[in-house]
Amino acid sequence: MIIGYVAYLILAVVVVIFLSAAIRILREYERGVVFTLGRFTGVKGPGLIILVPFVQQMVRVDLRVVVRDVPPQDVISRDNVSVKVNAVLYFRIVDPERAVIQVEDFMAATNQLAQTTLRSVLGKHELDEMLSERDRLNSDIQEILDLRTDAWGIKVSNVEIKDVDLNENMIRAIAKQAEAERLRRAKVINADGEQQAAAKLVEAGKMLAQEPQAMQLRYFEALHDIAGERSSTVVFPVPMDIISHFMGKSDKAK
């Protein structure tokens, strides 16, 4: 009788072990790459998966988007400026079979490829482009990575450059350059203003020269403005034609 109970117990243990080795449950975002005696036999999931114990093995693959931080990379720009650049990489597996069979560790491989591609792409651009055209650089890096990881069944959806770190000397040089640029713009704007003012004065002079009475009115307006300031000194403008008249008489007297 005792031997019968022991036999039933052993059988129950064997059944439990068999079921635990045969039954797999995959979540909605998981897939199972199944190998039968070492050979690939298919991709299964999600849901309940039944395997033949000791004959079939399964590798779980997560299909969700993976976010990886690309470590800071030393990059020398095309204009010979040394900077440190780091980025964020977004990718996901679209073909579990290739992700498991074609590459040993797709996570490490993608991360290393992202580092080398980041250095390669940014090294072809100048510092100003790194600082002002990040969207275009992100797109270029993403396209290159997506093309190279396609053989691994991986889709690179986005790459974002986070920081571009400069040394103190370069920061001071950029600040001086920006200050010089602002001064140049200020001088150009001032010169344009002087040029426009001179053109308007020439135009006004031509109009006033056509009507001598208009010049007299300008004289009176100037005197009115001076009188309104309560100044003890009054400067009275003398018409140029009067001065030229006296200058002509003096020349004749000689």
Image: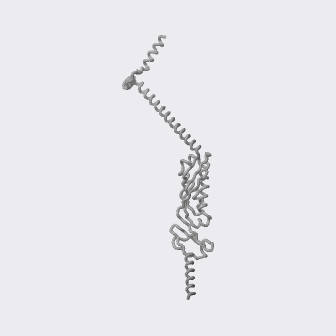
Residue at the bottom extreme of this rendering? 1
The vertical placement of 42 against 233, above or below, is below
Estimate the x, y position of residue 170 in percent, counting from the top left.
58, 44
The vertical placement of 223 against 138, above or below, is above
Residue 149, picture quadrant: bottom right
Q: Is 138 in front, or is 73?
A: 73
Q: Horizontal placement of 228 versus 59: left or right? A: left
For residue 214, say whether it is visible.
Answer: no
Q: Is 125 in front, or is 244?
A: 125
Estimate the x, y position of residue 88 in percent, counting from the top left.
55, 56
Point 47% across, 13% down: residue: 250
Estimate the x, y position of residue 230 in percent, counting from the top left.
37, 24
Estimate the x, y position of residue 233 in percent, counting from the top left.
40, 21
The vertical placement of 198 against 91, above or below, is above
For residue 83, say whether it is visible.
Answer: yes
Residue 157, picture quadrant: bottom right
Residue 168, picture quadrant: top right
Point 49% across, 34% down: residue: 190
